[in-house]
Image: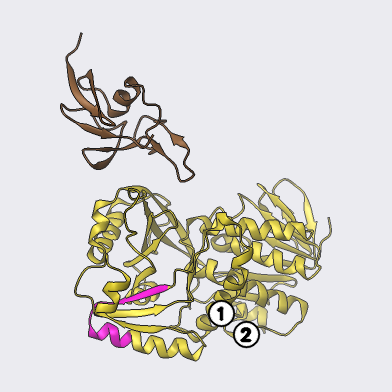
Chain colours: A brown, B yellow
Amino acid sequence: MSATIAIRIDGRDVRVAAGISVAAAIAQAGVVATRRDVAGEPRAACCGMGVCFECRVRVDGEEALGCMARVAPGMEIVTDG
Amino acid sequence: MNYDAIIVGAGIVGCAIADALARAGLAVCVVERDTIGGAATAASMGHLVVLDDDPAELALSAYSCERWRALAAELPAASDFRATGTLWIARDAEELDEARRKQVRLAQAGIASEIVGGAALAALEPALRAGLAGGLRVPGDAIVYPPAAAAYLARRAAARGARFVTGVAVDALTGDGVALADGRTLRAPAVIVANGCAAPELVRCVPIRKRKGHLLITTRPPAGTAPLANHQLIELGYVKSAHGADGESVAFNVQPRPTGQILLGSTRQFDDTGSEVTPRLIARLLERGIEFLPDLARLSALRAWTGFRPTTPDHRPLIGRWPPRDGVWLACGHEGLGVTTALGTADLLAAQLLGRPLPFDAAPFDPARYAPEAATA
């Protein structure tokens, strides 16, 4: 069993495996959407390799790609889901 | 099949011509080798702007912008037409003098504009850096999403009977029509070559060169954030960049999209004919953008892409009959102004083809200026 770390997703304290991507942490936390498009439709991680930009979230206040960013202890992730 | 006119190319110029000719009752066929509005049209910014540095260009762009404003109410929402106006930015007193000369030239074509000082500029566009001298506001300019506008013109032409053949290239002009790559031939007494950078592939000696450009769009800012720009913002140095000699240039040219995204231009290169994005040019684009709009640095880039402007030696489009070949007409070579001038180009070409009164002087755009001498003698 790998080490876990504490982060916050949409204000909720969760523990996730260290070293996983933000997108994986969001999925593990049961949050379906990372953001909403112009029409208000929910969007989620798609390509997983930093190209499609569907997994945009705010990490510690800055916009980031969930699939490219790695979790870190105390990280604050805010989705638009 | 027999038509009255065949149009090669369904970019925004070809679509506008199809619309104008179908409206006049002609049987029209448009042949597009790729998709409608998919090349230079899709790559462009869609800034509907009156440019005044050449009297012919001023007449064409002023007429065309008026036509866009008249069309605006009809355009579907996806066309994203917005009457943002243009704000030409002067960094110093010398550039503000240039803004004043620009105002006089625009006024001569009936285009209203106002000089704004440094404080007024800051009030209109709070995100611009401090210390700019002022600028010239042209309220009649606008923005549009070009592929959607082209698709609308195509649909309107089709509703009036125009036929669109897409996904098939024209292999050759046959003298009485066109030969398609799939072996079919289409016949018409008039063939209008409106395929931009690809025109020299069909018509020998047409002097069109590809001039590469890079554009970049940011993600949307968080909800509730003030937009980074309200007008389309361009530095007054732009014209020097746009009409300068060969080589590479970058000018500050920013468009606020209706979503709050920022569309950032513009670069110009003659030497690079590959479509890949060049990181060095993107870096220069961003540096230039941040120099004027410091908060641009806080946004994320969503996409960057390139496109090619079909450029003629005198920077004027080729609109009219091509003397060396009977029945061949040109409507190409619009460089970076094809979206703006599509409607004026269509009106001019339709008037020429139908023998009707011309909307403005056609002589500066006459393709004969580049026809091989032996053929025109």
Label ID, residue B107: none
The reply to whether residue B201 is in sight is no
The residue labelled by disc 1 is B60
The image quadrant that residue B319 belongs to is bottom right
| Residue A68 image position (x, y, % from top left) | 28, 32
Question: In the image, which disc is placed on residue B360?
Answer: 2
Q: Are marks 2 and 1 on the same chain?
A: yes
Q: Image quadrant of residue B88? A: bottom left
Q: Which subunit holds the residue at mark 2?
A: B
Q: Nearer the viewer, residue B138 or B165?
A: B138
Identity of the residue drawn at 72% across and 45% down: B182
Q: Give the percent coordinates (x, y) of residue A37.
A: 44, 42
> Residue B235 appears at what percent x and percent y?
32, 73
- Above-or-below relation of B292 to B138: above
Q: Is residue B63 left or right of residue A40?
A: right
- Mark 1 lies on a secondary structure that is helix
Q: What residue is rendered at 74% in x and 57% in y? A: B158
Tell which of B91 and B368 is nearer to you. B91
Which type of secondary structure does the marked residue at label 2 adopt? loop
Q: Residue at x 72, y 85 (%)?
A: B357
For the record, the magenta segment spans B86-98
Judged left or right of residue B366, residue B325 is right
| Closest to the observer, A35 or B203 | A35
Subunit of mark 1?
A: B
Q: At which x and y percent is residue A26? A: 32, 26
Dot 2 or dot 1: first in sequence order is 1
Q: Is residue A25 above or below residue B152?
A: above
Task: Check if residue B25 falls in the magenta segment.
Answer: no
Circles 2 and 1: CB atoms closer than 8 Å: yes
